[in-house]
């Protein structure tokens, strides 16, 4: 994680909680997502590099890779106190330029990012194979609609949605009702399919037109 082998992490004093290790994106996954997200951002011809906001930061490994790849500030939100404490400490001892806040992201607040990262807890929405995107905590379509509604004028943002390695037609349809799908990238170690990332574009126009 964080681009380091395990020995380096231990020597630096980094510690990863068991639950965070289960939930986190590996370096291979996070790098694939970073490349796809910034390629999508570049294709929109939106000018200078955006702020990257991770609504569910966890280890902040996904956020670290995407913001590092983009060469811009990364801002993460994490509400579980022990996860926040461990991640904040790891970012500090590893000297990573990511800001982490111990609260939820306020969609109607002043921060308007170019790229958002969405990896909410799956809970019972994941049956071991497929993810029911409408039952994550909170539901992914609802988050995408909120991010779209928060866009000013005809601006838009790229959102990276973490998915399991099986992405069903039902999941794609639920996302496509509230956002434009730009890309679907699979990732894993040595070319294996361990997970996927949906890269989507949100806009106020599409959020307004989508069903509640
Ligand atoms: C699946 S993990 C994210 C993993 C992350 N992508 C990584 O690379 O480590 C989801 C995280 O979101 C946190 N979380 C849950 N609800 C939240 C909320 N409303 N705001 C911020 N963080 C939240 C959980 O504590 C958990 O650490």
Image (spheres, rainbow, N blue to C red):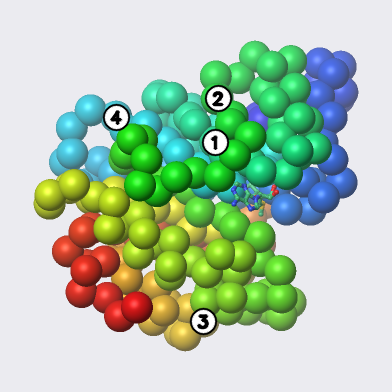
Camera-nearest residue between 3 and 110: 110
Q: Quadrant of residue 211?
A: bottom left
**Which mark is first along the chain, 1 or 2?**
1
Please tell me whether mark 3 sits on a helix, a strand or a loop: loop
Residue 111's place in the image compared with 161, above or below, is above
- Residue 63 position, x and y percent, is 54, 37
Q: Determine crowd level at label 4: few under 14, some 14-19, many 20+ residues with C-alpha closer than 10 A.
A: some
Question: How far apart are labels 4 and 2 at the CA level?
Answer: 16 Å
Does 108 sit left or right of 15 as displayed?
Answer: left
Residue 143 in view in this figure: yes
Q: Nearer the viewer, mark 2 or mark 1?
A: 1
- Residue 2 position, x and y percent, is 66, 30
**Which mark is first along the chain, 3 or 4?**
4
Question: How far apart are labels 2 and 3 at the CA level?
Answer: 33 Å
Q: Which residue is mark 3?
A: 168
Does 200 sit left or right of 84 as displayed?
Answer: left
Q: Which mark is residue 98?
A: 2
Which residue is most to the bottom? 170
Does 14 sit left or right of 27 as displayed?
Answer: right
Are the residues flagged by discs 2 and 1 in contact, CB closer than 8 Å?
Answer: yes
How many numbered marks are there? 4
Q: Determine crowd level at label 1: few under 14, some 14-19, many 20+ residues with C-alpha closer than 10 A.
A: many
Residue 206's place in the image compared with 27, above or below, is below
Identify the residue shown where x is 23% and y is 58%: 203
Q: Nearer the viewer, mark 3 or mark 1?
A: 1
**Which mark is first along the chain, 3 or 2?**
2
Mark 4 beta carbon near ligand 1 (under 8 Å): no
Please tell me whether mark 4 sits on a helix, a strand or a loop: loop
Camera-nearest residue between 4 and 172: 172
Question: How far apart are labels 4 and 1 at the CA level?
Answer: 17 Å
């Amino acid at each position: 994680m964080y681009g380091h082998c395990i020995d380096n992490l231990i020597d630096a004093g980094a510690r990863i909680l068991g639950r965070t290790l289960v939930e986190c994106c590996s370096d291979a996954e996070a790098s694939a997502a970073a490349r796809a997200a910034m390629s999508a951002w570049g294709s929109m011809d939106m000018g200078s590099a955006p702020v990257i906001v991770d609504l569910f930061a966890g280890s902040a490994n996904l956020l670290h890779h995407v913001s590092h790849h983009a060469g811009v500030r990364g801002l993460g939100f994490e509400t579980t106190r022990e996860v926040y404490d461990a991640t904040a400490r790891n970012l500090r001892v590893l000297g990573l330029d990511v800001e982490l806040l111990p609260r939820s992201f306020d969609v109607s607040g002043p921060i308007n990012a170019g790229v958002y990262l969405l990896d909410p807890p799956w809970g019972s929405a994941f049956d071991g194979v497929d993810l029911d995107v409408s039952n994550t905590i909170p539901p992914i379509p609802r988050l995408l609609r909120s991010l779209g509604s928060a866009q000013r004028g005809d601006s838009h943002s790229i959102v990276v949605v973490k998915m399991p390695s099986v992405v069903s037609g039902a999941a794609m349809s639920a996302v496509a009702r509230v956002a434009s799908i730009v890309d679907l990238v699979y990732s894993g170690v040595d070319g294996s399919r361990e997970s996927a990332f949906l890269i989507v574009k949100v806009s106020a126009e599409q959020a307004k037109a989508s069903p509640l």
